[in-house]
Image: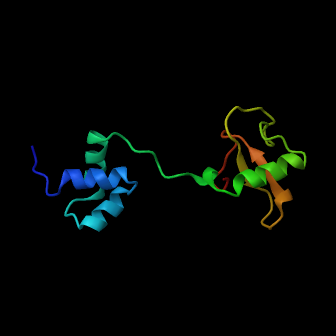
Amino acid sequence: MPRRHYDLDEVLALAEAGKTAAEIVEELGLPVGERAIQKAINKFVGPLPKRPAARSDKMRPRVVAWMVAHGLNEKVCCVCFKPSVFDMYLRELKRDDELGSLIFVCRHCKRVGDF
């Protein structure tokens, strides 16, 4: 079994505090790669939650509420017109600052630029 060149307790404490493997390697100046730290964390702590996605943005609920108030249904895709129980993505139809150019799309109709 390979010998560790770092203090596992210190690494696990930083991981539980919310630091990523890259931040742990940089902070402790470890001679191992990020993947080795990720494997150790997964083995002893279990997989940690991913960083919050764009959906946790504070502005998103306000934008969705505005879109619903102006006639869009947040549970029906505007491309395929199928209802969905999952959260919808937002698609920008025109490159402008207007909220009126946003539509709801389902995960099947989602493209790269949708958020």
Say which quadrant the N terminus sits in: top left
Residue drawn at (88%, 48%) of the image: 69
Q: Is residue 27 above or below residue 2?
A: below
Residue drawn at (74%, 44%) of the image: 105
Residue drawn at (79%, 57%) of the image: 93
Q: Residue 35, can we see it? A: no
State the count of labels: 0
The residue lying toward the viewer, choosing from 105 and 30, is: 30
Residue 98 picture location, percent across and down: 83, 64
In the orientation shown, which residue stands out farthest toward the right?
71
The residue lying toward the viewer, choosing from 98 and 59, is: 59
Quadrant in the picture for residue 44: top left
Q: Residue 4, can we see it? A: yes
The residue lying toward the viewer, choosing from 110 and 37, is: 37
Quadrant in the picture for residue 14: bottom left
Residue drawn at (33%, 56%) of the image: 21
Task: Say left or right for 70 vs 22.
Answer: right
Residue 109 picture location, percent across and down: 70, 42
